[in-house]
Image: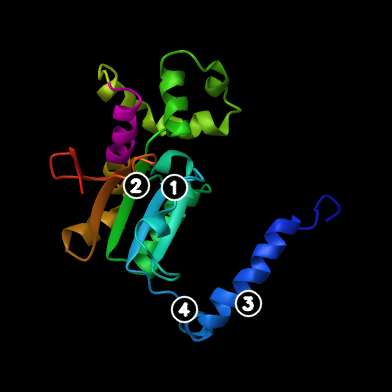
Amino acid sequence: MPFTKPLPAYLVTRYHGWKATTHAENHAWYRRLADEGQRPRAMVISCCDSRVHVTSIFGADQGEFFIHRNIANLVPPYEPDGQQHGTSAAIEYAVTALKVAHVIIIGHSSCGGVKGCYDMCEGRAPELEETSSFVGRWMDILKPGYEAVKDDPDMPRALEHEAVRVSLRNLMTFPFVREAVEDGSLSLHGLWTDIGEGTLLNMDSKGSFVEI
């Protein structure tokens, strides 16, 4: 395609370094992953934010997590309308094909997507209200969450926590998720991490976030 360009030189250099060290030293493991396929125990839904590095937080190896990233780690409600739904497709594959035992939603501090929803709901982001804004329409998923915490003095952090709650509630609208949860083969988890402090909070059964 005429509009494509060669990969930046620094990425080429990093690739060759990885191939000569990490891959070479663990070649048998990579061959096993390729030949036997993936068998992750957990699906992680996290934000696209480049500062959120889930595998580093948990010291995970390749093949351990089935990871889906989107703006503000949101899960939309179940909507089988015949249209294209990337996040819903990833959830369906993880639960019905890979048979993961856990689905983990992980939010984070200073989330730009959540801040955009907050500004939009406060009337400070008219550009996100445009029907042409993909980000704005995606953040509509979180609008009910804003209504639930709009009087909280710790905004937008309260809304970051609510994004995790909204996603977990929406997960339970998927029939195959609800069935797996009810028969005990799947468990759902809500987390939130502070990027600067490195702390990790776990959502308890009451919806409160408690530091691990």
Q: Is residue 52 above or below residue 92?
A: above
The boundaries of the magenta stretch are 154-166
Q: Which residue is mark 1?
A: 52
Q: Report the amino acid beneath label 2.
A: Ile
Q: Earlier in the sequence, mark 4 or mark 1?
A: 4
Q: Which mark is residue 37?
A: 4
Separation (CA) of disc 4 from disc 1: 26 Å
Q: Earlier in the sequence, mark 3 or mark 2?
A: 3
Q: Which residue is mark 2?
A: 106
In contact (CB < 8 Å): disc 3 and disc 4: no
In contact (CB < 8 Å): disc 3 and disc 2: no
In contact (CB < 8 Å): disc 1 and disc 2: yes
Residue situated in front as seen by the camera: 62 or 78: 62
Q: Quadrant of residue 12?
A: bottom right
Residue 162 among those drawn in magenta = yes
Q: Is 24 placed left or right of 29 in the picture?
A: right
Residue 197 horizontal/vertical position (percent): 34, 41
Q: Earlier in the sequence, mark 4 or mark 2?
A: 4
> Which mark is in front, 3 or 1?
3
> What is the secondary structure assignment of the residue under circle 2?
strand
- For label 4, the crowd category at 10 Å Cα-Cα, with few meaning under 14, some 14 to 19 and many 20 or more, is few
**In this view, which residue lies farthest toward the right?**
2
> What is the secondary structure assignment of the residue under circle 4?
loop
Q: Earlier in the sequence, mark 3 or mark 1?
A: 3
Which residue is located at x 35 percent, y 25 percent? 156
Q: Report the amino acid beneath label 4.
A: Gly
